[in-house]
Image (spheres, rainbow, N blue to C red):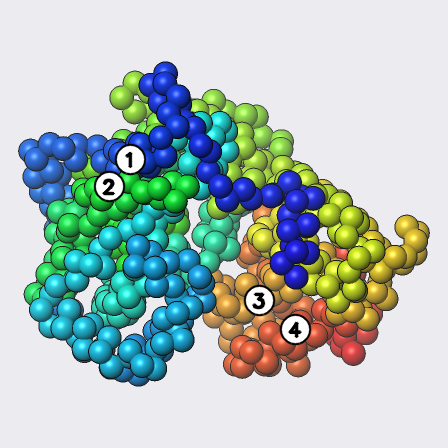
């Protein structure tokens, strides 16, 4: 099976070369000494970990004061102290089981796979060690050493800046981190500390929810005849620039005190890393700032660090900030151009001040501003500035993997999907004579349906999306070796493969069902006992683009679902399986066909 995927990836142009170059260019010289290259890359990555002002103690003190004063101004009462419990052997074994079964290992050469095999024999002493760390507030020093493996991204292999550092931590560190994570995250949830604007690295949160927040804010404002602008921030090495003193002060503010606070401080202090380059290693060098790469706790600590960012202008309802980890985007709405420009400039100024006070650096040359409008609206040329630097006014941005144009036509996103599908389709054609139908189907779901499914609820109803459906049918004809003019409808049904439009409808209904808090039922607006009383309420629609958006279309599609399926909502697993079976049995060739099918059978899809 591995050989099959190697062939697929090779045909798609994704062949990975594990070995690193033997020579690199540095300051005009060609260096071939592998240990020297390893040391240079270590110095290079550590220099990138120094955030703005990290070397100036006066700046650190000033920014700590400013960042904590900001928190004091925006919260009325202090947060309660964290309450935590010691771990148990049962929790340790459960934690080990949740780790991915991989063969990669840190400097201690112990892999996750080996840890899982030995779990029954070491769970008791590991429980003792974890409880000792919790009791004393000390994270073991030997678990704070990271082995860095460079991975080439793109560009010249002789340029160190074209390599991404991948950190491998000791496997026992992951176990203790997970124990700490559970207690810290529980405290944050119980006290409702994490911002509702943050969608990254959180349970029951997804990229779909973040994209929905952005897209629906834009479409709803357009529907109300408001002008809409978007600022898309690009932070320089955000995770690596986290100032430890500011983070620790914020943790204290949120109730992380006592031994638990000491434990987090110990976790951050005195961390070291070394680089492996073609089996040659650098010296161990100290990490001065940032949250540990490749860690379990690191992402959560970063969320806490930026948690108060959405509090900027929190009393204003003219903007919506969307955070996905270090991706920061803001949608601004206003009744006229002058107000939009003023509000956007004021908000961007305040965002920059917040970043400076928290020692994060904004890449002004990569931060973009977009004026969103309908196709019929005259383009505006807003100027968003900070420190005499104007933001680039872009007509196309990439947001969490989706290509979003200023008119929300989704044409660029469809083109992007088509390019990726064409590559997969070619690879499928190349291997079809050597593989069984079952293996080809497995490749289809992994390499074709997964590409179509991502973000489909946003672009699946666009006019150009029909091109994706045509290519999907071409892929099926390759797998089942049928003629170009033969119908695929029976193939979809018999092989339990959803058509593109069935996949869109299925994904949209699931999104609505899983995010009911975003939608209002009809009985919230009237108490009349009508047949549609429990359906979702459809808002006033003044714009066709809004009507085709995920909010309105989601309501229409969900309301049209057979009542027998809607009645299963209380059982999410059964609801999802029944819904999937429904769309396997009904290979819809258009969204219109879905609505017509129900009407033609008087509300029944049987």
Position of residue 463 relative to residue 524, above or below, is: above
Residue nearest the observer in this picture, 235 or 288 = 288
Q: Quadrant of residue 416?
A: top right
How packed is label 3: few (under 14 Cα within 10 Å), some, or many (20 or more)? some
**Residue at x-position 77% and y-position 56%:** 590
Mark 1 or mark 3: name the one nearer the start of the chain.
Answer: 1
Residue nearest the observer in this picture, 170 or 584 = 170
Mark 1 or mark 2: name the one nearer the start of the chain.
Answer: 1
Q: CA distance from mark 4 to mark 2?
A: 56 Å
**Label 4 with label 2: CB-CB less than 8 Å:** no
Q: Quadrant of residue 170?
A: bottom left
Mark 2 or mark 3: name the one nearer the start of the chain.
Answer: 2
- Secondary element under disc 4, as helix, strand or loop, is helix
Q: CA distance from mark 1 to mark 3?
A: 50 Å
- Which residue is the site of mark 1? 39
- Which residue is the site of mark 4? 579
**Label 1 with label 2: CB-CB less than 8 Å:** yes
Q: CA distance from mark 1 to mark 2?
A: 7 Å
Q: Kindly report which numbered mark, 2 or 3, lies closer to the viewer in this rendering.
A: 2
- Which residue is the site of mark 2? 283
Q: Kindly report which numbered mark, 4 or 2, lies closer to the viewer in this rendering.
A: 2
Q: CA distance from mark 3 to mark 4?
A: 9 Å
Q: Position of residue 152 (x, y in %)?
A: 47, 38
Mark 4 or mark 2: name the one nearer the start of the chain.
Answer: 2
**Label 3 with label 4: CB-CB less than 8 Å:** yes
517 displayed left or right of 326: right
Q: What's the mark number on residue 510? A: 3
Q: CA distance from mark 4 to mark 1?
A: 56 Å
- Secondary element under disc 3, as helix, strand or loop, is helix
How packed is label 4: few (under 14 Cα within 10 Å), some, or many (20 or more)? many
Residue 16 visible at all: yes
């Amino acid at each position: 099976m591995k050989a099959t995927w190697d062939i697929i990836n090779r045909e798609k142009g994704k062949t990975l070369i594990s070995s690193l170059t033997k020579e690199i260019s540095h300051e005009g010289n060609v260096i071939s000494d592998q240990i020297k290259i390893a040391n240079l890359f270590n110095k290079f990555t550590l220099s990138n970990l120094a955030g703005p002002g990290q070397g100036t103690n006066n700046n650190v003190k000033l920014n700590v004061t400013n960042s904590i004063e900001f928190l004091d101004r925006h919260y009325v009462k202090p947060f309660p102290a964290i309450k935590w419990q010691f771990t148990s052997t049962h929790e340790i074994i459960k934690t080990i089981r949740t780790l991915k079964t991989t063969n990669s290992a840190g400097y201690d050469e112990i892999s996750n796979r080996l840890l899982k095999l030995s779990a029954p024999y070491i769970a008791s002493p590991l429980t003792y060690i974890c409880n000792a760390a919790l009791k004393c507030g000390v994270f073991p020093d030997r678990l704070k050493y990271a082995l860095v493996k460079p991975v080439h991204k793109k560009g010249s292999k002789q340029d160190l800046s074209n390599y991404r550092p991948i950190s491998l931590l000791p496997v026992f560190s992951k176990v203790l981190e997970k124990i700490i994570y559970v207690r810290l995250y529980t405290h944050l949830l119980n006290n409702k500390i994490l911002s509702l604007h943050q969608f990254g690295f959180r349970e029951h949160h997804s990229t779909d929810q973040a994209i929905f927040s952005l897209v629906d804010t834009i479409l709803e404002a357009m529907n109300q005849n408001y002008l809409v602008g978007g600022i898309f921030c690009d932070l320089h090495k955000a995770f690596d620039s986290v100032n430890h003193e500011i983070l620790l002060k914020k943790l204290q503010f949120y109730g992380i005190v006592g031994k638990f606070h000491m434990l987090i401080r110990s976790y951050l202090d005195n961390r070291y890393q070394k680089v492996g380059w073609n089996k040659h290693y650098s010296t161990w060098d100290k990490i001065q700032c940032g949250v540990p790469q490749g860690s379990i706790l690191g992402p959560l600590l970063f969320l806490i660090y930026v948690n108060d960012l959405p509090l900027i202008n929190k009393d204003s309802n003219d903007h919506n900030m969307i955070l996905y980890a270090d991706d920061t985007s803001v949608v601004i709405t206003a009744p006229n151009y002058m107000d939009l420009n003023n509000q956007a400039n004021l908000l961007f100024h305040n965002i920059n001040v917040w970043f400076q006070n928290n020692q994060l650096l904004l890449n002004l040359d990569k931060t973009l501003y977009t004026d969103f409008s309908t196709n019929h609206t005259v383009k505006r040329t807003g100027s968003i500035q900070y420190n005499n630097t104007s933001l680039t006014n872009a007509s196309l941005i990439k947001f969490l993997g989706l290509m979003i144009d200023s008119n929300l036509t989704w044409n660029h996103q469809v083109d992007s999907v088509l390019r990726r599908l064409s590559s997969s389709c070619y690879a499928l054609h190349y291997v079809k004579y050597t593989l069984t139908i079952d293996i080809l189907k497995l490749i289809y779901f992994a390499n074709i349906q997964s590409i179509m499914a991502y973000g489909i609820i946003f672009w699946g109803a666009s006019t150009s999306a029909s091109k994706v459906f045509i290519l999907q049918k071409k892929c099926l004809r390759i797998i089942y070796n049928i003629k170009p003019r033969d119908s695929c409808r029976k193939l979809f049904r018999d092989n339990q493969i959803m058509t593109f439009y069935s996949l869109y409808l299925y994904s949209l209904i699931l999104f609505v069902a899983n995010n009911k808090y975003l939608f209002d039922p009809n009985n919230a607006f009237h108490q009349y006992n009508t047949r549609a009383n429990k359906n979702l309420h459809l808002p006033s629609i003044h714009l066709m683009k809004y009507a085709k958006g995920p909010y309105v279309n989601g309501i229409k599609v969900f309301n049209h679902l057979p009542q027998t399926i809607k009645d299963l909502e209380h059982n999410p697993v059964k609801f999802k399986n029944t819904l999937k079976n429904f769309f396997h049995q009904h290979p819809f060739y258009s969204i219109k066909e879905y609505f017509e099918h129900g009407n033609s059978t008087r509300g029944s899809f049987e």
